[in-house]
Image (cartoon, grey):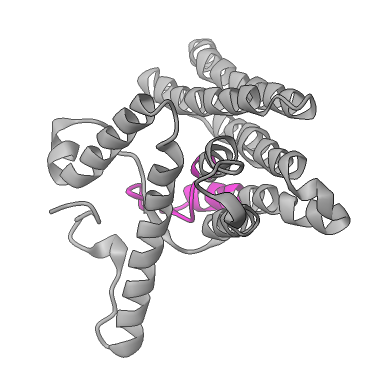
Amino acid sequence: MRRRVTRSIVPNLLTLANLFSGFTAIVNISDGRFTRAAMFILLAAIFDMLDGLVARLLNSTSEFGEQLDSLCDAVSFGLAPAYMLYAVYFKEFGESGIFFASLPALSGVTRLARFNVESAGIEDKRYFRGLPIPSAALTIVSYIIFYHNSELVGQFGEIAIFGITLIASYAMVSNIRYDSLPKPTIRNVRRKPVFFLFLIVGIIASVVTAGDAIFPVMMIYVLFFAAKHFILWLKETINPEDEIDESTDSGKSTFEI
């Protein structure tokens, strides 16, 4: 028992590092240092990825760790991006601005609660129901930092930030299935070659462009599965006798050729 507790310390410390990074991001947002805040949100995402990986490697996954992870994610990927939206743009709209800026936080917390309930039962680990909250945070923050005040967006900046806020918020609480990130094994690479190619290209493009490509890559991820969900819904509506169940599609992924 003591050995298991000792093993759980490392992943839990990484989870708390996620929370600390999110808190630091909020402090920087309050000081108007948005780029620095975005870096800490990205750092929180790295810690969020590492804590689960380390927990599995040490065989120290626990219900406590899952709940702690969700609480920390609510701050780093829910509250921090929402506050950034408010500080950058929505504060000029008064109380209505507070409401719109809070949508990613409200949706993110709801998404986390639903995930915790579902993970306690039978769940298809190949998919997430609803956009994962770190992905939504990365989408919002990358737009704010790289595009909101850019010439590329120009006069459509106000419409864009409203649209992205609504899209990210709705995607989190929707029933849209998003492929989860599988372990980078040879078997998984062969099963999802396009997925891994998209991931590698996205990472390389983001590094080469010094972050400019993060937002387009995230929007492709968000909208691709939304479009797929709509097409499947349309097929089921037109041909209700041919019901399509993504969880029983012979184990094939969206990205499998």
Q: Residue furthest right?
A: 94
Front residue of 47 and 36: 36
Foreground of the two, 57 or 21: 21
Task: Identify the residue at image location x=66%, y=35%.
Answer: 71
Which percent across, then down, holds residue 92? 83, 49
Find residue 186 and report its horizontal and vertical position in percent.
14, 32
Q: Quadrant of the C terminus?
A: bottom left
Say which residue appears at 44% left-offset and 30% top-offset. Answer: 211
Where in the figure is residue 73, as x and y percent of width and height?
Answer: 61, 35
Asked which quadrant contains residue 80, the reply is top right
> Magenta part of the protein: which range?
112-135
The picture places residue 134, in percent across and down from the top left corner, at 52, 39
157 or 111, which is in the foreground? 157
As displayed, is residue 43 above or below residue 125? above
Q: Is residue 203 above or below residue 57?
A: below
Which residue is found at the position 38% from the left and 43% from the top? 217
Q: Is residue 113 magenta?
A: yes
Image quarter of residue 245: bottom left
Residue 240 appears in view: no
Q: Is residue 157 magenta?
A: no
Q: Residue at x 32, y 48 (%)?
A: 126
